[in-house]
Image (spheres, rainbow, N blue to C red):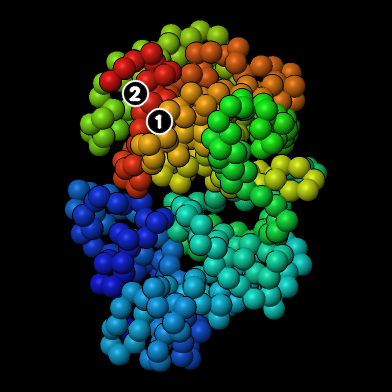
Amino acid sequence: MTDPTELIKQWLPHQRWFGGKGRAIAAVTQTSTVLLRESDPQVRHVLVQVGYEDGGTEDYQLLLGFTTEAVAQRMEYSVLGDVDGSVVYDAVHDPLATSLLLGHLAAGDEVESLSFVNADDVDAALPGRLMTAEQSNTSIVYGDDLILKLFRRLQPGANPDIEVTKALSDAGCLVVARPLAWFDGVVEGQTTTLGLLQPFLKNSAEGWAMATASVRDLFAEGDLHADEVGGDFAGESERLGVATGEVHLLMAEVLHSAVVSAEESRRTAHQMHERLDAALTIVSELAPYADGLRTAYDEIAARTDPVPVQRVHGDYHLGQVLRTQDGWVLLDFEGEPARPLAERRALMSPLRDVAGMLRSFDYAARHLLAERADQRHLAYRASEWADRNREAFCDGYARAVGADPREEVVLLRAFELDKAVYEVVYEARNRPTWLPVPLAAIGRLVGAVA
């Protein structure tokens, strides 16, 4: 059988969803290979483990095609290379290959080490197309009805996205997309979620796109305030706050929740310090803010009041919500893929999600300024937009849960800062021109000037 391992090793670092950017790969090992189609083009489902020269490993999911024929022009950019007379390509770009996955999901069958689970009726005849938006996973849309999310970077165990959305859907929640089917494999000896099929909300708009359109409308009006332009987003921000609060209340009811002591606050602060220590070794521009960050984290460590904790979204931002004709829908409850699975499934303060969305409003307002030096004079307008929408979101959230998150100043500020530190590392590795956005936010929150 054709061995594409060396091609995979060269190809992986260039993929948007690859988590080891900047690390030298020592070896790539195929840990599972399942033949989904034998005739040309051959299709294999492949799990690989990447070993790094600095130590540690990561597991990834691939769908590979092999053909002796010319690859269709529309898929030329998906080619890994040639080996043993076959062209090897990333088969998520090939409708023939993705239809194989849908067929198995519809049947709910097993194929060697892959187990497909069907929870609802699925039309196996729908054609598939790859979504091209930047994501940490890969999404395939079938017709106008279904969307399959393939988890690219894998951690052994059940993915929280299925666990949480199924629990919420079973409780009658209409603010999440219900799981229709999913499939599992074996990673490092554990049954592991590989893909999740959900309804495709075709008549919807992404929160990020709506928010940034509103910012552009404001920037285009030279003499109007944020509440005066036609694209004012504050009403939607408030409704999103209500939806978020309602989901948090239901999550606390149908999943685990607790009230933790001061010891948990100290543990949370310790984790924040550890993440900051790691970030400082990667991004030197963060150093001028380190003292202010540590002071904010120490304020959490000194906290003595109990803290309510529960399951949360874990990676909440405007790119994770869709506005449908019926209201907001929350997506992608897997948490931050780079963090350990146990941490993503742990009970946390729901203020982490609130802080994540507040950071996202700041991003939406300021990312254009980071890339366009000639628009620095619009900084005050970006601040006005961000403040207005952050306040509206908190107003809606407070109305839904009966408690105002802004009253928890110490917790909310520390969670925002922790999220901004994560963003600093992400931008330094993936979008260096955006690095000033989280750095400036940290400076505002700690009152520091680099």
Q: Amino acid at mark 2?
A: His
Percent coordinates x, y for residue 331 in the rendering: 62, 47
Percent across and percent down for residue 315 are 52, 39
Residue at image point 25% right, 24% down: 287
The kind of residue tagged 1 is: Arg
Earlier-in-chain disc, 2 versus 1: 2
- Specify the label residue 376 is tagged with: 1
Task: Please give left or right for residue 195 compared with residue 67 in the image.
Answer: right
Which residue carries the number 2 mark? Answer: 273
> Quadrant where the N terminus lies?
bottom left
Expressed as whole percent of the image width and height from the top left, the position of residue 72 reads 45, 84
Q: Secondary structure at mark 1?
A: helix
Q: Quadrant of residue 208?
A: top right
User: Label 1 neighbourhood size at 10 Å, few (<14), some (14-19), many (20+)?
Assistant: some
Residue at image coords 66%, 47%: 322
Q: Residue at x 69, y 21 (%)?
A: 395
